[in-house]
Image (cartoon, helix red, strand yellow):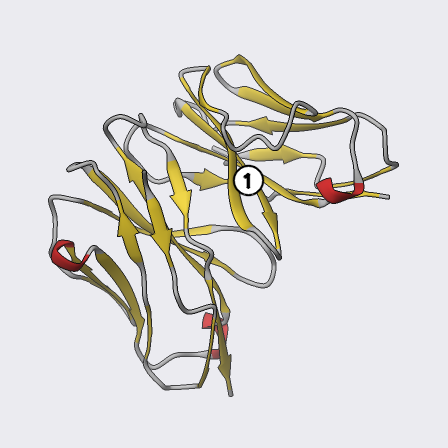
Amino acid sequence: AQKVTQAQTEISVVEKEDVTLDCVYETRDTTYYLFWYKQPPSGELVFLIRRNSFDEQNEISGRYSWNFQKSTSSFNFTITASQVVDSAVYFCALSEVGGSQGNLIFGKGTKLSVKP
Amino acid sequence: DAGVIQSPRHEVTEMGQEVTLRCKLISGHNSLFWYRQTMMRGLELLIYFNNNVPIDDSGMPEDRFSAKMPNASFSTLKIQPSEPRDSAVYFCASRAQNTEAFFGQGTRLTVV
């Protein structure tokens, strides 16, 4: 069965600090996709990144970076030099390609508060 | 494309009434997901469809909930009869195969 665990329920940092959001997943499939979404206070869910299970290269996009490690089943998200606008709930998600035909399961989310 | 469109954005109804939530998929997408979000339970997957066929409805809370895809671009989620504990934000999302899902703005349902 697939499962996504985001152990950090809430994180509070001061602006310009770096912060890492953890995501650990479980799956029996060898082929799967991992995602991060952002939900700002306005409520919409915004896609941030997708990785497939065969691509373990880390990715950087501006102040955002992602560290995918299959050995530890983790897909962590780091925000460098955080800003108040980064305050949101961040969700990690998993989609299996095989038996479940593309189910998309989310973790419970991590609420990030960035204070000025 | 206008993205995933959900209607209504807000719904207030009395306990016992039927509620129908609507979702228009992005053109070309073949998977459709319905989620419910509450403070207590987070973002729960209710049901998802591939190519108009329901694949997994194990997340549907009970028989009061039903979902349909009458065609490739449209879906409904119906609650009959509604109860106060159904109050939540309901999201639908669509995607093309093995890509990211795009979410609608959500429907905030309040059952009084």
Which quadrant of the view contains residue A69? bottom left
Q: Position of residue B80 (x, y in %)?
A: 76, 24
Q: Residue placed at 36% from the left, 86% from the top?
A: A17
- Given residues B48 and A41, the one toward you in this image is B48
* In-image side of A63 versus A58 (left or right): right
Q: Residues within 10 Å of mark 1 (few under 14, many from 20)?
A: many
Instruction: Give the residue displayed 51% in from the left and 88% down from the top.
Output: A116
Instruction: Work out whether residue A41 or residue B66 is closer to the camera in this orientation and state it.
Output: B66
Q: Secondary structure at mark 1?
A: loop
Q: Is residue B100 left or right of residue A114?
A: left
Q: Which residue is mark 1?
A: B104
Q: Residue at x 79, y 42 (%)?
A: B84
Horizontally, residue A7 falls left or right of residue B88, namely left
Q: Amino acid at mark 1?
A: Gly
Q: How many labels sit on residues?
A: 1
Q: Position of residue A2 (x, y in %)?
A: 32, 41
Q: Compare residues A70 and A45 and report the one nearer the observer.
A: A70
Quarter occupied by the N terminus of chain A? top left
- Left or right of residue A110, residue B16 in this image: right
From the viewer's perspective, is residue B76 above or below residue A28?
above
Q: On what subunit does the disc labeled 1 rest?
A: B
Q: Residue B101's spot in the image, x, y percent?
A: 40, 38
